[in-house]
Image (spheres, rainbow, N blue to C red):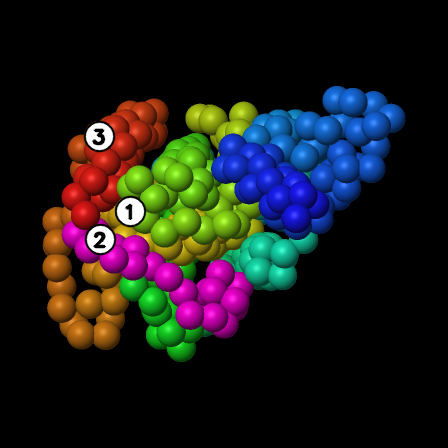
């Protein structure tokens, strides 16, 4: 009886510590080192902390990207300019496709710090796949847009499977206190379309130095906070009436690792840029954004954390789709993506577009998030 009580107490203690980032759920490279070598060198026990591994992963991703990117970008293809884009001539000749460098760095860092879970590993595989497809598009100077759209949708479907694991998925929505259980056969196609939209909106936003990386970086920081501190924390999730996801902290590490990569990339992409991420960077970045929103359990979070990205790039997709398939011409005086409209029609500089769009997202997201969490 005493032994059972001791075991139960130990389990309860581990469960409680897990709320605060300790005792990861599954094996990982650095966690194994912390478990087996802590007796030899005490500080190695930090490798058993989610919080420490998150910080380490972010820093390592940033340093590796910062160091390796300028050493490798000479092997990248050169930008050929884009028809109808504002100031397209300023990008011509620059290395493009930097995602093929920093996305593998992101995956490597995640393999060091994230539990070896089938769903997370599948998501990383999808990110690598769409990165490679984007790089081939960068090298070719532009594939057929229908072929790219089909690839995005197929990879999005596999990513949706990675998130739900072909199991019934629990969602939470605004204005409803109870959770909603969604069949995987409903979740997967709906999630695939959402991911497709985010991938292409993110890709369309990549037209001003630093804009797409900065906006997505902000979104990843917000999503990491939600995954780690809200849905990933049992007590806070209970207080806010949202479901608790035991793997929330693991998904948060992915978000912070990408933030690190983007920090290293933006060092060289700040106006005037020296290198461009291309489809090899923007598409996997959009894919990860969609995956993390779904991992949070509320698809509407995409409007909260990346509303500026969706409005900037997604509205252009809507305009083109209505014109091409239904011959409906809307917003005739508005140029898309919206960042081109403000540069060409309003005379904003690249810096003004970047700062003002970031301010809109940085201020708007906390306000919308509070409303989303409290009005339930």
Quarter of image, res 366: top left
Question: Quick one: 324 or 64, which is closer to the camera?
Answer: 64
Between 175 and 260, which is closer to the camera in this rendering? 175
- Say above or below: 181 vs 1: below
In the current view of this chain or complex, which residue is farthest to the right? 40
Label 3, label 2: how many angstroms apart (C-alpha)? 46 Å
Q: Earlier in the sequence, mark 1 or mark 2?
A: 2
Which residue does the numbered mark 2 point to in the structure image?
Answer: 177
- Residue 223: horizontal and vertical position, in percent? 41, 41
Q: Is residue 320 above or below residue 110?
A: below
Spatial CA span between label 1 and label 2: 6 Å
Residue lying furthest front: 1
Relative to 182, say whether 298 is above or below: above
Q: Nearer the viewer, residue 129 or 180?
A: 180
**Do the numbered discs 1 and 2 sit on residues whose CB atoms are within 8 Å?**
yes
The image quarter in which residue 170 lies? bottom left
Viewer-closest of 347 and 105: 105
Residue at image point 29% right, 41% down = 240
Q: Which of the marked residues, 3 or 2, is nearer the chain's N terminus?
A: 2
Q: Which residue is mark 1?
A: 241
Mark 3 and mark 1: Cα distance apart in space: 46 Å
Q: Which residue position is annotated with label 3?
A: 347
Q: Which residues are magenta?
A: 156-179
Q: Whole-percent x and y of residue 328?
A: 13, 68
How many labels, in total? 3
Which label's residue is closer to the chain start, 3 or 1?
A: 1
The percent coordinates of residue 205 (x first, y second) are 36, 45
| Residue 19 lies in the magenta-colored region | no
Q: Give the residue displayed 71% in from the left and 49% down from the top.
A: 27
């Amino acid at each position: 009886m005493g032994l059972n009580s001791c075991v139960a107490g130990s389990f309860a203690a581990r469960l409680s510590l897990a709320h605060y980032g300790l005792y990861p759920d599954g094996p990982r490279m650095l966690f194994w080192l912390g478990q087996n070598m802590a007796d030899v060198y005490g500080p190695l026990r930090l490798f058993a902390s989610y919080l420490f591994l998150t910080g380490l992963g972010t820093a390592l991703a940033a340093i590796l990207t910062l160091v390796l990117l300028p050493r490798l970008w000479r092997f990248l293809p050169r930008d050929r300019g884009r028809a109808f884009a504002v100031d397209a001539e300023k990008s011509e000749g620059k290395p493009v496709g930097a995602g093929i460098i920093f996305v593998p760095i992101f995956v490597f860092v995640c393999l060091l710090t994230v539990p070896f879970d089938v769903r997370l590993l599948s998501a990383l595989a999808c990110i690598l796949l769409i990165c490679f497809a984007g790089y081939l598009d960068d090298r070719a100077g532009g594939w057929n847009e229908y072929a790219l759209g089909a690839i995005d949708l197929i990879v999005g479907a596999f990513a949706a499977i990675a998130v739900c694991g072909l199991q019934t998925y629990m969602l939470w929505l605004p204005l409803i206190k109870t959770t909603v259980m969604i069949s995987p056969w409903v979740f997967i196609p709906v999630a695939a379309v959402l991911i497709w939209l985010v991938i292409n909106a993110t890709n369309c936003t990549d037209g001003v130095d630093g804009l797409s990386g900065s906006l997505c970086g902000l979104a990843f920081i917000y999503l990491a906070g939600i995954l780690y501190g809200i849905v990933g924390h049992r007590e806070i999730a209970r207080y806010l009436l949202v479901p608790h996801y035991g793997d929330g902290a693991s998904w948060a590490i992915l978000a912070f690792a990408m933030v690190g990569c983007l920090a290293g990339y933006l060092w060289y992409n700040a106006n005037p840029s020296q290198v461009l991420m291309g489809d090899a960077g923007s598409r996997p970045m959009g894919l990860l954004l969609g995956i993390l929103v779904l991992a949070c359990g509320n698809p509407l979070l995409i409007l909260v954390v990346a509303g500026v990205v969706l409005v900037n790039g997604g509205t252009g997709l809507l305009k083109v789709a209505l014109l091409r398939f239904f011959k409906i011409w809307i917003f005739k005086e508005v140029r898309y993506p919206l960042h081109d409209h403000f540069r060409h029609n309003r005379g904003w500089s690249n810096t003004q577009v970047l700062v003002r769009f970031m301010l809109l997202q940085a201020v708007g997201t906390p306000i919308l998030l509070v409303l989303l969490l409290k009005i339930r």
